[in-house]
Each structure stands twice: as structure tokens, then as C-alpha cells.
Image (spheres, grey):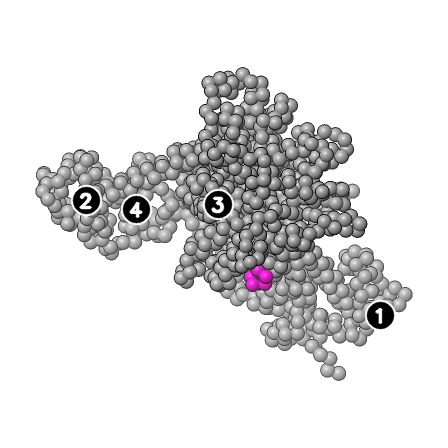
């Protein structure tokens, strides 16, 4: 009963939204009942490099995590190529922030990249030669094949980031979600990543990248989403990446909104 | 009456100086005589050739236990759940006591292992559930949750044991062996139980090897790929529970955690691969179980649980000191070697740059350099520089001409030229390709100039081929004979070892 | 009742009195220090140290060849401090995870102590069992004469330890507070955080040693963690937390001993381990505190959420009725009509309607409701907040008019008069919301 109800609108959307890599509608996420992003809605075009820009605490990582159901949504709907994330998970590749793992863990770069294939290999089945070959190809693509057998703490920050990128590449997904891939990497790595992003774009993939460095935005991205707790604006970089919009995104804090949110939190506690 | 009986019982267990004199059973021997009587050859043979059926059973059981604990412990360690095992094993005590009381009052034999262990499993799981509840529902952190569950459950267990000891069934005291471990009471069926449960745990973890690895390494990624993280976590905790429980009899609940923690922690010093980590941990666990229980079988006075732990600990200490590649010794040696190498290269480069600055390179004969000039180039103390020079002399890189004059040997000159070349390549690379963004240079790379690998050098040379017209690059900045010259930002990022 | 009376008939003020006194002294001395262990997230270090003093005891015994207190005391304290040191060394030199390092150290030391003690056990009765659960029941039997009074030795020792701990906590209160909160800052401002850390560890070891023989280390571990953790659930202030933890420790000690004597009688057994029951009593107190703490208690948080949900529902109902009245003054909605629009569940809605009627904000007849004058007044404030927010969001947050309604709906419940005035200023005192509806004035001026 329930399932049939939920399937039919999905089918409708299949035809209309299948081409849209990611469609976020009315998404609100709260940590400890304090809202982090409010009523965020946007669609992203296929085959583009898309930057998410915003100040610290604007909810950029939260947005990505909520898209992938890593944290619960307070409200809203997310569709990946017209279906729910659960159904189209295999089409999404995720590059988490480098700090999210313990790099002292006893695995080498090749093992980490192979992890991108674990779902494909299946439960309980061992990793085979062909999987390692594919992982090796991905490492070659990001240019660190020479370090495949190094324990991951012996890689430099840039090489670690490339390892994570390779792990996402090996999945051969259609939509990539990247959480600050350019944070604290060397110039060479940044160039390498940008080049890979360009290659991905040319083969029709879409990448949604959280980015910090405003200077490089017009150079790297075709499309930007300006985020500060809510979407300030989104669209082609040329149209949207304007001083006024940046002022809105980074300047002009919504003091009263923050005050009210704070009261809301306090009142909920003291009630 | 019962209170009195209990006091007497506790008296027999505990020091009570006031009553000590009245105790008739006190030994008349000198209390200084406490040598461990050395066993005879036939005792050794009996144990090591497993002649005795009982010994065979015990050693087999503890070996299997050590193996499974080592393997499961590897994952628990990597998941940073080491101490949860401790709280869990303490939390089993009330279950054991309650299972005994219930079974006995139902007319069954309360002392059979399966009955006691199922009680232990239930209260162990309750303990874990309580930890999770405290951690998730209150603002207390994990450590406090562990401490609360550990002490309160164990206190309840002790209180229940107090009751067990009053039960008419005289064989109740055997439960104490679960606290400290007592392999002597192990019978064949117990060993089979331990063995089969341990093997099952190992099989499960082998089958789920890559899923558990992913869980321990990157939970978020596992979740994003659609692995049921909570379910996997529960499987891991379940495995820990089972291993803990089968170890209670042999090692005791206080020390059980050590079998889960020590072998994997020791194995970590020997490897950088998770596969070998669990393999080495399994072997170390098996060895501790085997040697420990054999020792306690040979020496009648050594408690088995403690011996197993001590064997594991000695392995840990050996591994921590001598382990390769992560032991303390090898790391110290490596750091020493690197420092020596850096110092030598700095010395050679200083001499070379001095010669270059004084236009003495082109001459046929290698000119000597005054040591005092080298002090000015780097912040070396006289003793440190003296040491470095002496070591370089031993390597035939330089020779002392007179009191404070040193000279490069031909070998030294070649080496110095190479070092300077590499250094300048690196500097050039920084300037040309990193837009002098020294903040963006990969500082955490272990391979800055002193440890440049051949392929990196080749890469750099290829990149900079147009600039590399001569064998030895000209320095891209004005040579700084005084330390701290103009280009310090670049040159410093080029040699953080200095 | 009969059983309890029977059990308590064996109550002996001399014996039980001293047992309780010893239990209280031990619990309080331990809980005092435990506050800082819990706040420093080192609860398990207390556990580790209390286990690891065993080889110190045994070694002191081997060296001094006597069971005299002083060498054993010193030996155990040294072992306790070594535990903290070894853990730190293994963590930093061996690059081992802290929990694992602690596990390695204290189990190894405990095993070592166990082996040493078993070697000695043939000759002297140092039993590992009593290290764990002690023999508090024997407290009154070993006495010393102090100033003509016959006082159990343990009570004398524990009193001294309690005094030391108390002095430490009082004298170094602010240093402890600062170094527990931010060790780095403490060091930069001139307090040596490491020194304080190791002093604390030394006192933990001393307390554990002084207590182990009588009450066993299980009670020590429990009292290190459980009363402070319970106090942490009850207050946010460090000073109060310490006082509460001490009170809870006293209660746990008393109820623990009484229940050790009485509870087993209910099931036909004699009394059981007092130390164990004290730990259990402390555990029950913790459960109570965790459930009912005034700000962080589980029940309170739950109830608070429910209340908030109802409050919002009540305001939503009034708001809806106000809007209905605005549009169609004759329509008197019933509960079903309201639920249809608000998507609320049946019985909370009915309950809220009953509450609102009771508060005289709405009046109902035949299941149909209308606003009273008081309700209308209150609602005007809410609508004003709502529409002001909508205006603010459009003007300052650059949001489109279609999306603001829901946000404003959330915010309006948290807007007091002051904030409304600020909003009014920020929106240039308009009188229309972005949808074109009028913003009602703060007060009716007719």
C-alpha cells in the first residue's frame, strides 16, 4: 500500500528528472535542533563542474552529507537522477574531507582505492586481481601510481587527497560530491585535481565541489551555488558570481535571524 | 548466623591482622621462603609433548582462544573500542552469578559452562546497551559511560557472588575462577566450546574482512556506499562479546581485555597492512595462550590467566622496542640516520657554496676551506660541527688539511655537486611552479630535498630541462653566505631540515 | 516488612556504624577526585590505577618482607603513578591509541601483581580477591587507639586521605578547574598543567591504596566515576557538582550497606558484599539522576520536547482560527476541520483545544470553537511576529516570497516583544507583509 503510493510519483519523476544529476528541494537540516541549512532548493545541470561557495559554518558539508543521508534531514527531498539516493547510490561518488579518517590506519593507498569497489565486489567476497588492476588505473589517473604500496600516513597531504579522489573515480559514478578537495594541498595536486575534473566533465560526468578559494572559482567552475544557511543564488558562474551576491553570501550576517534561532534553542532548553 | 558465616568466609580470603594469629591454618614456614620449585624434566616433557590429556585440552583451548581474540581484537583496536571490551567483560559477572542462582534453584547443575556463559552473554550485552544508552542519551562521554557500567555491573556481580557463596550447594566457590581465570577446571567439552565458538568468530571476521576494514577505516564512506554501518558495528561488538565470554574461564574477566588488546597492539609495530596486522595478532595471541597456559601447567604456582597476559605483555614490549617498521628503536635509528644525512649534506653544500662564492671551483686543485667560515654559514655549534666533520672524514668525503682547514676529497666534491644540484632543482621548482607560494609547498611530504627519490629528481629535471643547462644549476637566488639572507622564505621551505 | 525487621535485628551500631563510616569516608574521598577525572574524560584511568597498584603492594611486600603498612603504601602509590606514566609513554613513543595503551598497561601490571601475590600467598594471606571486593565488613575488627578512643585503623587512614583530598581540591580549585577545562591555556598562564595532572594521579593512587584493603577497588572505581557522573547530570557548575557528588556518595554508602544486609533477606539469603551493594546503590542513583536531571535529564528533555510541540500546536491553532476569522467571521471551525489543515494528530489536538478553552483563549460550543477577546489579543501578537518575520526574510535574507511562510511560522513562536520591536525597526515599520496582508499593530489603539 505504502510502497505503491511512493512508487508512482517516483515514476513520474523518472521521465522528467532523470537527466538532472541532483535535485534538492526544500531541504532543512538541524544539528541538535539548531538549524544549519534552511529550506535549500536547487537543481544542478548535468555535465558541469559546480562549485559550492560560502563562508565557514554556512552548511556546505552539511548539505553534501544530508544529500547522501549521512545525517538526518529535518525536512525536504533529494533526488539523484530522478530517484532517491538509496536507489541511485551507485551513480554517486563521494570524496570526504581528508580529516575525516585516521591516516595512521594500517592500509596502503591501493587498499583505500579498492574500498571504492567493495560494494561492487559484494558481501563476503574477496578482492580479486581485476579489482586491484582497476584501482591501480585510478591511481595512475590521479598520478600517484608510484606510491600505491605506501602506507597512507606516509603520503603527503596532496597524495592523500588524490587517493581519496581515486577511490571515488574507481566507482565510475556519474555524479561526484567532493568535500573540499583543494583544502591544504600543494599546487601540483590542485592542478592535477582540476585537470581530472575537466576530464570528468568532458566524459559527461557532473561534479559538485565545495570550494574555499574565491579567486579560482571562475577558472574552475562553470556553475556555482552560493550558500549561507540558505541558497543565496545559483546559476552559471558568469551570471551569479557577482560582487553583490558575494556580499550577500559573506557579508551581511542575518543578525536577527541568528538571534531568533538562538532564542529558539534557549527556550527549547529552558521550557 | 549467616552474617557470621560470611565474615568467616571472607576472613579466610582476606588479611585481617587482628584475627591472623587466631587462624590455625597459617603456615609455619618462614615467609621469606617463596622460591618457585623448579619442575623436573618429566613435567616439562609432560607439558610440551602434550602427553597429559588434561594439559592437551587446556593448551588447545587457550591457543584457540588466543587466536580468535587476536583476530577480533585487531578490529576492535582499529575501531578504537579497546576499553569497551574491559567494561563488557566486567559486566558479565552478574550474569554468571544470576545464571548460577537461577539454574541451581531450578534444580539444574548451575556450574555447567554453557549455562554460565549464556548468563554472561546476556549481561554482557546489557552492559553494552547501557554504555550506548548513556553515551547517546546523556551528555556524558564514552569514558564515563564505560566506567559507570564497568563498576556498577561488577559491583552487582560481587553482591550476587556473596549470595552464591551462601547457597547450600557446596561447589559454588568455583565461580570465582571466572574473575581471575583458572584453566585447571577446563574439561574437554569446555575446550570444544571455546574452540568452536572461537573458530566461528574467526570465520565470520574472515568472511566480513573487507566490510569490517571499511567500517573501521571510514565509517562515513561506508555509509555513503550503502553499507549498513550500524549492523556491521553490531556484528563487531557481537564478536567481541563472544570472544570475551569464551575467554572468561581461562583468563578471567579482569584480564580478558588484555587478550583482545595486547596482541593487536603488539602486531601493529610489525606491519602497516591490516591483513598482516590481524595475522600477526592471531599468531601472537595463539602463542600467548599456548605458552602462558603451558607455564602455568608446569609451575603449579602460576595462575594461568595472569601468565597468559604476562607472555602477551613481554611480546608487546619486545615488539614496541624492536618492531619493524614501527618500533621505537627503528624509528630512533631512522631519525638519527636522517639527521646525519641532512647534516652531512649541509656541510658539503656549505663547503661547495663557499668555494663557488670565492671562485675557487674552476681550479684544478680542490682548495681547503677554513672551518670558521662554515660557522658563519649555518648555526652550528663548534662541537656539533666538529662531530659532523669527523663523520664526513670517516666517509672519505673531506679531509683535514691543517688545524682549522678542511678540504673536499674528489669523492666529496662529486657528492657535494650532486647535493647542490638537487637543492637548486628543488628551489627552482618552487619558484617556477609553485608561484613562490611557500605556504602551498607540500611540507608534509617526507621527501624534501634530502630524501628526494630518483624518480622525483628525474621528474624535476624533466620539468626544468630548459633551465638545467649545465650539470650543476646556478643558484636561482643570490648565494647567501650569511644565514638569513633575502630569499629566506624560499630557501627555508626548501630545507626544513636545517 | 517482617524480613527487613528480621534482617535489621542483627544491626549492631558498633559494627555497622563503623562499616558505614568507613564506606562514607572512602566514597567521599574518592568522589572528590572523581569529579576531575570525569571532567577530564579520564574516568578509565581511575579504573586502571586501582587495578595496577597490585604489583606495587606485592613488590613492597617482597622487599620489606612484612605486611607493615608504610612500605606497601609507598609501593602501591608508586605503581599507581607508573601506570599513568607508562600509559603516556606507550601512547606517545609507541604511537598506540590511548585506550589501548591503558588496556595494555593496567592489565599487564595487574597480571604481574597477581603472579607475585600468588607466590606470596602460601606464606601470607595477601589475597587478590580482597583487592577487588575488599572486606569492609571487617573494618571494626582492626582498631588503633587514638587519643584514648578505639578507632578502626581504616577509618583513621581514610580520614587522613579524605583530609588531604579535601585540602587539595579546596586549595587548587581554580587551578584544577582551569587545567581540566583547557590544559594548554593553563600552562600558558603559568599553572603547570602537567604538574597538576600528576599530582591528581598521585592522589588517585593514594586514595585507591588506602581504600583497597577495606572496601576493595571495585568500590573505588565506582565512586571515582558514578557519583561525579550523576552530579554532572544534575548541575552545570563545578562547585555544585563537587558538593552534589559528595552527597550522592554518602547516600550510596549508607543505602549500600543497609541494602547489603536487607535485600538478600527478601530472597532468603544472608547479607552480601557491602562494597558491591554500595556500587549498585551508586549506579541506581546515577540512573535516577540521568533520568530526572533538571536540565540534562532524559525525562526532562523528553517532556520539554512534548511541551514545546504542544505549545506550538496551541499557537498554530489560535493562528489558524485568527486567519479563519479574518477571512470569514462567521465560520466556527471544529476539531476535525482544524486537524485537516494543521495535519495534527487527534488527541493532542483535542487536548490542546481543551487547554485553550480552559485558558479562556477560545470558547467552544457543540464542538465548534471561536476566539475570545483574550485569544484574539494574543493572536495579534503572533500574526504580527509572523508577518514581520516574512518581511524581514524577504528584505534582508533575499528570499523569495513563496518560501518564507514556513520559516516565519517557525520563528514566530520564539519572538518576544523586544525582538518584535527590533524587527519593526529593521523592516522600516511597514504595515503590510510581502503577501500584502496587513501587519497588525502591537497594541490596539481604538
Task: Establish if B62 lies above or below A6.
Answer: above
**Circle 3 chain:** C
Q: Main secondary structure of the magenta part?
A: helix
- In this rendered view, identify the residue nearer to me: C335 or B269: B269
In magenta, the rendered stretch is C237-243
Residue holding disc 4 = B497
Q: Position of residue A264 (x, y in %)?
A: 64, 64
Mark 3, secondary structure of its residue: loop
In the visual, does A71 lie left or right of B105?
left
Question: What mark, if any, has residue B386 been given in the picture?
Answer: 2
Mark pair 1, 3: CA separation:
83 Å
| Residue shown at 81% from the left, 61% from the top | C351
For the question of whether residue B42 can be seen, the reply is yes
Mark pair 4, 3: CA separation:
56 Å
**Circle 4 chain:** B
Same chain for marks 1 and 3? yes
Dot in front, 1 or 4: 4
Q: Seen from this angle, which residue lies furthest right?
A: C366
Mark pair 3, 2: CA separation:
57 Å
Amino acid at each position: 500500500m505504502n510502497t505503491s503510493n511512493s512508487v508512482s510519483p517516483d515514476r513520474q519523476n523518472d521521465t522528467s528528472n532523470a537527466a538532472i544529476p541532483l535535485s534538492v528541494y526544500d531541504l532543512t537540516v538541524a544539528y541538535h535542533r539548531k538549524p544549519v541549512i534552511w529550506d535549500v532548493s536547487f537543481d544542478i545541470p548535468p555535465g558541469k563542474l559546480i562549485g559550492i561557495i560560502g563562508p565557514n559554518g554556512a552548511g556546505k558539508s552539511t548539505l553534501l552529507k544530508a544529500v547522501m543521508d549521512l545525517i538526518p534531514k529535518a525536512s525536504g527531498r533529494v533526488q539523484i537522477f530522478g530517484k532517491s539516493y538509496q536507489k541511485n547510490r551507485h551513480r554517486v561518488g563521494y570524496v570526504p574531507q581528508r580529516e575525516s579518517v585516521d591516516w595512521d590506519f594500517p592500509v596502503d593507498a591501493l587498499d583505500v582505492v579498492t574500498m571504492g569497489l567493495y560494494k561492487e565486489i559484494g558481501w563476503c567476497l574477496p578482492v580479486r586481481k581485476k579489482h586491484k588492476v582497476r584501482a591501480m588505473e585510478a591511481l595512475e589517473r590521479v598520478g600517484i601510481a608510484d606510491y600505491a604500496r605506501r602506507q597512507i600516513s606516509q603520503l603527503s597531504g596532496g597524495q592523500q587527497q588524490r587517493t581519496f579522489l581515486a577511490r571515488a573515480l574507481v566507482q565510475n559514478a556519474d555524479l561526484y560530491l567532493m568535500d573540499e578537495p583543494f583544502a591544504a594541498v600543494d599546487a601540483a595536486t590542485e592542478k592535477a585535481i582540476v585537470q581530472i575534473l575537466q576530464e570528468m566533465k568532458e566524459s559527461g560526468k557532473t561534479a559538485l565541489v565545495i570550494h574555499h578559494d574565491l579567486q579560482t572559482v571562475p577558472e574552475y567552475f562553470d556553475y556555482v551555488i552560493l550558500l549561507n544557511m540558505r541558497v543565496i543564488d545559483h546559476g552559471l558562474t558568469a551570471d551569479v558570481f557577482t560582487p553583490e551576491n558575494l556580499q550577500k553570501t559573506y557579508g551581511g550576517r542575518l543578525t536577527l535571524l541568528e538571534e531568533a534561532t538562538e532564542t529558539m534553542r534557549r527556550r527549547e532548553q529552558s521550557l | 548466623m549467616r552474617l557470621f558465616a560470611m565474615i568467616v568466609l571472607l576472613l579466610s580470603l582476606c588479611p585481617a591482622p587482628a584475627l591472623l594469629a587466631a587462624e590455625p591454618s597459617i603456615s609455619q614456614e618462614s615467609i621469606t621462603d617463596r622460591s618457585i620449585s623448579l619442575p623436573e624434566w618429566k613435567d616439562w616433557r609432560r607439558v610440551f609433548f602434550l602427553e597429559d590429556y588434561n594439559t592437551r585440552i587446556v593448551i588447545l583451548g587457550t591457543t584457540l582462544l588466543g587466536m580468535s581474540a587476536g583476530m577480533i581484537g585487531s578490529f576492535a583496536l582499529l575501531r578504537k573500542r579497546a576499553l569497551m571490551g574491559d567494561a563488557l567483560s566486567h559486566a558479565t559477572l552478574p550474569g554468571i552469578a544470576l545464571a548460577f542462582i537461577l539454574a541451581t534453584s531450578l534444580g539444574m547443575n548451575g556450574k555447567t559452562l554453557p549455562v554460565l556463559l549464556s548468563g554472561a552473554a546476556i549481561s554482557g550485552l546489557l552492559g553494552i546497551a547501557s554504555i550506548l544508552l548513556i553515551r547517546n542519551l546523556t551528555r556524558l562521554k564514552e569514558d564515563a559511560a564505560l566506567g559507570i557500567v564497568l563498576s556498577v555491573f561488577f559491583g552487582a556481580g560481587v553482591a550476587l557472588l556473596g549470595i552464591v557463596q551462601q547457597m547450600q550447594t557446596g561447589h559454588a566457590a568455583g565461580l570465582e575462577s571466572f574473575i581471575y581465570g583458572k584453566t585447571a577446571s577446563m574439561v574437554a567439552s569446555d575446550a570444544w566450546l571455546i574452540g568452536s565458538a572461537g573458530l566461528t568468530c574467526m570465520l565470520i571476521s574472515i568472511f566480513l574482512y573487507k566490510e569490517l576494514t571499511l567500517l573501521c577505516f571510514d565509517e562515513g564512506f561506508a555509509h555513503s556506499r550503502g553499507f549498513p554501518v550500524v549492523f556491521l558495528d553490531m556484528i563487531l561488538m557481537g564478536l567481541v562479546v563472544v570472544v570475551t565470554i569464551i575467554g572468561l574461564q581461562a583468563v578471567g574477566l579482569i584480564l580478558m581485555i588484555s587478550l583482545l588488546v595486547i596482541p593487536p597492539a603488539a602486531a601493529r609495530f610489525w606491519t602497516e597492512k591490516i591483513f598482516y596486522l590481524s595475522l600477526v595478532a592471531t599468531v601472537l595471541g595463539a602463542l600467548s595462550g599456548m605458552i602462558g597456559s603451558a607455564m602455568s601447567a608446569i609451575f603449579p604456582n602460576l595462575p594461568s590467566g595472569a601468565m597468559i597476559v604476562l607472555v602477551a605483555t613481554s611480546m608487546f614490549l619486545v615488539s614496541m622496542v624492536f618492531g619493524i617498521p614501527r618500533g621505537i628503536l627503528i624509528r630512533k635509528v631512522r631519525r638519527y640516520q636522517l639527521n646525519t644525512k641532512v647534516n652531512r649534506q649541509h656541510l658539503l653544500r656549505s663547503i661547495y657554496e663557499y668555494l663557488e662564492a670565492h671562485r675557487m671551483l674552476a681550479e684544478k686543485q680542490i682548495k681547503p676551506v677554513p672551518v670558521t667560515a662554515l660557522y658563519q654559514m649555518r648555526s652550528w655549534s663548534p662541537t656539533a660541527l666538529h662531530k659532523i666533520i669527523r663523520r664526513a672524514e670517516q666517509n672519505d668525503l673531506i679531509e683535514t688539511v691543517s688545524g682549522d682547514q678542511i678540504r673536499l676529497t674528489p669523492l666529496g666534491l662529486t657528492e657535494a655537486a650532486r647535493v647542490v644540484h638537487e637543492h637548486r632543482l628543488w628551489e627552482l621548482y618552487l619558484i617556477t611552479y609553485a608561484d613562490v607560494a611557500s605556504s602551498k609547498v607540500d611540507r608534509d611530504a617526507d621527501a624534501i630535498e634530502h630524501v628526494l627519490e630518483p624518480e622525483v629528481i628525474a621528474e624535476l629535471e624533466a620539468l626544468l630541462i630548459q633551465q638545467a643547462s649545465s650539470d650543476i644549476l646556478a643558484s636561482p637566488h643570490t648565494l647567501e653566505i650569511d644565514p638569513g639572507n633575502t630569499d629566506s622564505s624560499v630557501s627555508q621551505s626548501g630545507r626544513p631540515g636545517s | 516488612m517482617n524480613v527487613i525487621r528480621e534482617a535489621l535485628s542483627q544491626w549492631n551500631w558498633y559494627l555497622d556504624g563503623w562499616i558505614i563510616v568507613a564506606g562514607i569516608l572512602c566514597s567521599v574521598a574518592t568522589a572528590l577526585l572523581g569529579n576531575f577525572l570525569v571532567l577530564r574524560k579520564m574516568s578509565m584511568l581511575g579504573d586502571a590505577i586501582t587495578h595496577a597498584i597490585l604489583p606495587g603492594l606485592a613488590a613492597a611486600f617482597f622487599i620489606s618482607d612484612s605486611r607493615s603498612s608504610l612500605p606497601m603504601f609507598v609501593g602501591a602509590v608508586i605503581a599507581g603513578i607508573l601506570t599513568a606514566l607508562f600509559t603516556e609513554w606507550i601512547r606517545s613513543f609507541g604511537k598506540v591509541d590511548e585506550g589501548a595503551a591503558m588496556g595494555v598497561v593496567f592489565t599487564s601490571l595487574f597480571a604481574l601483581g597477581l603472579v607475585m601475590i600468588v607466590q606470596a600467598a602460601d606464606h601470607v594471606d595477601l589475597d587478590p580477591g580482597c583487592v577487588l571486593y575488599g572486606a569492609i565488613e571487617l573494618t571494626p575488627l582492626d582498631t588503633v587507639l587514638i587519643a584514648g578512643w578505639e578507632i578502626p585503623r581504616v577509618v583513621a587512614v581514610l580520614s587522613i586521605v579524605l583530609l588531604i583530598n579535601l585540602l587539595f581540591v579546596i586549595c587548587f580549585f581554580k587551578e584544577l578547574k582551569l587545567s581540566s577545562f583547557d590544559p594548554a591555556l593553563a600552562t600558558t598562564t603559568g599553572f603547570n598543567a602537567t604538574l597538576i595532572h600528576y599530582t591528581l594521579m598521585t592522589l588517585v593512587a593514594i586514595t585507591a591504596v588506602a581504600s583497597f584493603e577495606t572496601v576493595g577497588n571495585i568500590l573505588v572505581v565506582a565512586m571515582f566515576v558514578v557519583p561525579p557522573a550523576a552530579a554532572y547530570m544534575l548541575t552545570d557548575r563545578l562547585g555544585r557538582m563537587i558538593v552534589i557528588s559528595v552527597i550522592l556518595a554518602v547516600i550510596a554508602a549508607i543505602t549500600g550497606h543497609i541494602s547489603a544486609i536487607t535485600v538478600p533477606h527478601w530472597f532468603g539469603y544472608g547479607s552480601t558484599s557491602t562494597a558491591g551493594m554500595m556500587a549498585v546503590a551508586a549506579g541506581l542513583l546515577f540512573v535516577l539522576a540521568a533520568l530526572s536531571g533538571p536540565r540534562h535529564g532524559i525525562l526532562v528533555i523528553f517532556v520539554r520536547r512534548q511541551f514545546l510541540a504542544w505549545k506550538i500546536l496551541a499557537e498554530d491553532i489560535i493562528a489558524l482560527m485568527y486567519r479563519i476569522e479574518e477571512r470569514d467571521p462567521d465560520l466556527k471551525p471544529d476539531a476535525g476541520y482544524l486537524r485537516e489543515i494543521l495535519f495534527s494528530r487527534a488527541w493532542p489536538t483535542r487536548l490542546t483545544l481543551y487547554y485553550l478553552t480552559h485558558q479562556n483563549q477560545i470558547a467552544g460550543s457543540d464542538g465548534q470553537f471561536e476566539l475570545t477577546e483574550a485569544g484574539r489579543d494574543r493572536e495579534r501578537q503572533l500574526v504580527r511576529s509572523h508577518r514581520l518575520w516574512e518581511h524581514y526574510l524577504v528584505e534582508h535574507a533575499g528570499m523569495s516570497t513563496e518560501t518564507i511562510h514556513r520559516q516565519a511560522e517557525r520563528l514566530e513562536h520564539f519572538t518576544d516583544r523586544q525582538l518584535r520591536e527590533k524587527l519593526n525597526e529593521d523592516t522600516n515599520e511597514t504595515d503590510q507583509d510581502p503577501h500584502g496582508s496587513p501587519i497588525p499593530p502591537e497594541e490596539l489603539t481604538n
